[in-house]
Image: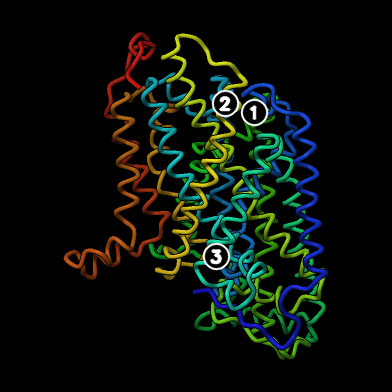
Amino acid sequence: MLTIAQSSGSGGFGIIDLAVVSGYFLLLAITGALFARHASKNSRDYFLGSRSMPSWAVAISIVATSLSAVTFIGAPEQAYKGDLTYLATNIGMVIAAIIIALVFIPAFYRSGSASIYELLEERFGPVARKSASITFLIGRVLASGARVYAGAIPAAIVLFGFERGNQPIYLMGAIAVLAFVGIIYTLAGGIRSVIWSDVIQFTILIGAALCAIVLIVVSFNAPLGEVLTALRTGGEGGTSKLTLLDLSFDWQAPFSLPACIIGFTLLGIGSYGTDQDLAQRMLTCKDAKQGARSVIVGILLGIPSVSIFLTLGLLLWVLYQRPELTSVTDGVPPEESMTIFLHYILTQIPPGVRGLMMAGLFAAGLSSLNSAINAMSAAFISDLYEPIMTRRRGKPLPEQHLVRVGQIGVIAGGIVLGLFACVCIFWKNSNNDTLIVFALSVMSFAYAGLIGVFFCALLTKRGSSASVIAALIVGFVWMLMTQRFVYDAIPRIHGPRIEYFYGINFTWKLTIGVLLSTSVCALGRPQSKASIAAPEAA
């Protein structure tokens, strides 16, 4: 379980800290009220912001959602335990951004839908669209549930204190609070409120990290050269913690260069090109050109953002592992490295500033929740509810009705995400992955099938409704069966080679899953336009 060690220095939350955090929530309440004054008139406005959002705001919203509390907590842990090789994952992400900007986004804008899965209906028929949307909904519950869990860790400690905040029952209470706040805020103004709140939350998130870096650097009493020398020899086995590229071909290495180029390109395509959560933001821009610009700028903006948190992890290593280089005399590291940044905030940061940093963590947690439940509701309305009800009624549904159902979908999505976040408490504690690796691997469950289907839709003329369904199932089942807990649960398959396979990095499992799903989808014979347009069973 999580353990936060309290030093003899400042620790816990005081009145000033509570005032700062309360001010943050007041800011959210005010902006939420402003959005509520401009209630969405139709589903296009609620889910797409009438395609009037500026590309710069969308870019910030993209990077804010992709960072999340996982980056706030997990990136410092990654550098504290290891080195800077996680930064190389941006190589694949940039490649993915270029592919999405040139291939995916123009196709999405041509379809003109609030859901990116309408493109699959044009190619394979209504059943394919529904199947992809359901796969997204399941995958988004898994991915965003893990992020909400990460955001609940600091919330539980602030709400319930050091001793109780690390217990599952109190973590569940913190998850409930985050879910409630996220639902209320998202209901206020749809995707507009999500994007503009992301801009606010990103500013607080980065500001908190920069503030921590300044405070740690000020505490150093050794020359910079001596600090760098300590980092160059402080890695496992005397390796450098400043290593940027892992040039090995170790299949079990999480951030080797081949994995970053191949695996993270696919993960980026899955995240930004086949996931309604992030793709929906790009569709709020005026046209495909601005949508493409938003994703490229968003991913490029993520590079310095992640660098800030990795740098923070290195500085925390110096603070706790080489305290003689600093003026800190009571720096006792936590038992678990996952809480290293949290531990520093709650034991070393002065009042007021501590509240600002915890507000940054709440910002990260809420950012992931707000966007996910809005995207889940949009996919449910556009791909499932509206087509089925329109067919039954024989006429389109009133726009205000769709908005109301969309709001109900937001509430349902928030509840489901909260429940799975509770599951993540026990899932994460059952393995030895860092928080970042855990969250990324959970994301890949739905992406293996979705990427394969979109590849067939955009790059080939092959595929059918049946092969789409088969590809989605194959991708999901493959990612599920390659999880470590499956190996642990089946003693009959134990052996050195099988154990090595189950230990390979999730990016290679995703790569194999994409190859399988793409091959399965391509087995379907091309359908004529007449057969695609013909009504199909829901």
Q: Position of residue 135 (x, y in %)?
A: 41, 38
Q: Amino acid at mark 1?
A: Leu
**Residue in the foreground of this view, choosing between 223 and 201:** 201
Horizontally, residue 51 falls left or right of residue 395, namely: right
Which image quarter is the C terminus in?
top left
Q: Position of residue 432 (x, y in %)?
A: 43, 71
Q: CA distance from mark 2 to mark 3?
A: 35 Å
What residue is pinned by disc 1?
Answer: 48
Q: CA distance from mark 1 to mark 3?
A: 34 Å
Q: Position of residue 306 (x, y in %)?
A: 65, 58
Colour scheme in use: rainbow
Disc 1 is placed on an element classified as: helix
The residue drawn where x is 39% and y is 21% is: 126
**Residue in the foreground of this view, choosing between 379 and 239:** 379
Q: Position of residue 352 (x, y in %)?
A: 82, 69
Q: Amino acid at mark 3?
A: Leu
What residue is pinned by disc 2?
Answer: 114
Among the two numbered marks 2 and 3 on one chain, the one whose residue lies closer to the N terminus:
2
Residue 451 seen by the camera: no
Q: Amino acid at mark 2?
A: Ala
Q: Evaluate if marks 1 and 3 touch, with contact meaning CB atoms under 8 Å apart.
A: no
